[in-house]
Amino acid sequence: MLLNTVSTKRWTLEPNSRLFRAGRTGGDRGRMPAIEISALRKIYDGRVVVHDLDLAIEAGECFALLGPNGAGKTTTVEILEGFRSRDGGHVAVLGHDPAKPDRRWRSRIGVVAQTTGAALDLGVAETIRHFAAYHGAPRPADELIEAVGLTEKAGSRVADLSGGQRRRLDVALGVQGRPELLFLDEPTTGLDPQGRRQLWELVTRLRAEGTTILLTTHYLDEAAKLSDRVGVIAHGRLLEVAPTAEFGGDLRAGATVHWRTGGLVHEVATRTPTALVRDLLAETPDGEIEDLEIRRPTLEDIYLELLATADGDTVRPAASDREPGPPSQSSSPSQSGLPAESELASESGLPRQPRTATRSWS
Amino acid sequence: MTVATGPATGPAAARGPDRRRAAAPPSAARIARARAALELRLYVRARQAMVFSFFYPIIMLVIFGSIDMGGTVAGGVTYVQYFTAGIAATGIILNTFQQLGIRIANERDAGELARLQALGTPAISYLAGKAAQVLVTTVAQLALLVVVARYAFDVPFPVDGAHWLTFAWVTLLGTLAGTALGFAVSLLPKSAKNADTIIVPIALVLQFFSGVFFVYTDLPGWMQAIASVFPLKWLTQGMRSVFLPDGAASAEVAGSWEHGRTALILAVWVVVGIAICARSFRWRRAS
């Protein structure tokens, strides 16, 4: 193999790339921020779980907050929802301090939480009709049931619903009051693929109506599909906030070229996939290159990379304290070394997302 | 429903915020009415509540009434007549304090209360819905009890208007006290798993100490002393003044029905329960 375009599999995050520069999308909407957070801090038993968090979410925006379990996502969201107190910082949600919730304010926000339950002995439609009484202008019950895909289960008892179906009911009850701001805390956990698609359609429609949405999710494709911006939180700190399309900055520039020769799988990470393919083609004047693919990193790849970088940096006092350093060297293609073989791919833990279609016999 | 799949910045967004969003939330009273209707439906559907709080007093009456205890309680009162009063009182406590305390603890544990909080439900609407459910089911339960006692066991109805009036105020005050204490006791269990274990023994011990299963004056002094602090003893005594002939008053510890003291002590417990609840009511599990 005479390839000369080889690099390490791991791109290093450049510290000064896009970190902490909150992006804007959809042009200037010219509205008040729906959520403003500055220096938010939460301490449990002497442990700082939310660490001087700064964030602004525009009205009408869909913002996805990503992060591993225990990163501080739900704590942050519950502070914004007015369910938890904070230990420091300033927070305004729809211009109101959530630490002093009142009914009028609550009526303007919708909550799909992970901790809410419904009476098991009630029917689905019965539950939704009951909760209509809590809102000034509830969405029509039938419309709501259909939007979350529970029409066939409308007459069933809540006790007889599956976990995913109960999640749909949670979503229905969260949006019933036509909230201006909707908190969706892992809304599709437990849903089947069809259920996820239905929820995505609903969220898309809510956005079209102008609803501001703060979404937390573990599904990166969901964040990519729905959000204008994403933020990654780990160890109580925001690692990166960026428009979804630009998220990852330099991490995004890389690509992986994948092909096979006989039983050997090759995977090469490179910033110049075209050059690499040109070389490959030159080596293969006729016949097919088996399983040739160029893969761009998915949001999930970038996310995992970011977290890996953050975990590697635990010695550093704070991500936000980093000095802007020189551009990282390791992200540029190296001129030496061997092609990264398939073991490398599994070593780096990158998921194989079938994003790029394999070109063959077309 | 058609789902807009176009970009978020399409014509819908240009319409601006939905004007209906400005609608004010409904009044606390309206939500309380909706809750009361819901609570009644849920009560009837919950088999456990129906057996252990609604029908339980009837079952007890049938058992006690069917056992020939021989002789009479002092004053020519039959045992079944004496125990009907105690069972009426215990039914109120089971249906309020016990059923309510366990149910609220369960609802809190299951996140049903967290949902109400998220919807901005006034706590008073929730509690009023519970109180309404308890009042309606208690009245139905007592009506059934009185009829069964009368026609199956020859326990006479309250003899005149004055006795019916006593029946009404004792029932109302007892229900309010039990309800307020049910709200309060629901805060004790850390989780729903502990709710039965904590709440049922309290109710059970009070039944033994308060003259429900035994003639009160036969109980040792220390049991009487403990029982007289709590509402069930006074509720039971009040019910005896409803179902027993006036002459039986002389057989009471004080030699009279002590209506004034009964009303006062029950009212104090109403206030205590409400105060605990107002101070410590929470929508979520203790974390």
Image: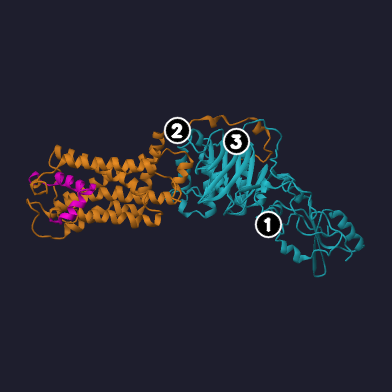
Chain colours: A cyan, B orange
Query: Would residue A347 be counted in the magenta stretch?
Result: no
Q: Amino acid at mark 1?
A: Gly
Residue on which disc 2 sits: B26
Residue on which disc 3 sits: A34
Residue A202 appearing in the image: no
Residue on which disc 1 sits: A312
Element assignment for label 2 = loop
Q: Nearer the viewer, mark 3 or mark 1?
A: 1
Q: Does the residue at mark 3 contact the one at mark 1 (Cβ under 8 Å)?
A: no
Q: Position of residue A138 (x, y in %)?
A: 51, 36
The residue sitting at the bottom extreme is A263
Whether residue B214 sits left or right of residue B74 in the image: it is: right
Q: Residue visible at 70% across and 48% down?
A: A322
Q: Is residue B193 above or below residue A216?
A: below
Q: Is residue A350 above or below residue A148?
A: below
Range of the magenta residues?
B218-247
Element assignment for label 3 = strand
Asked if both marks, 3 and 1, belong to the same chain, the answer given is yes
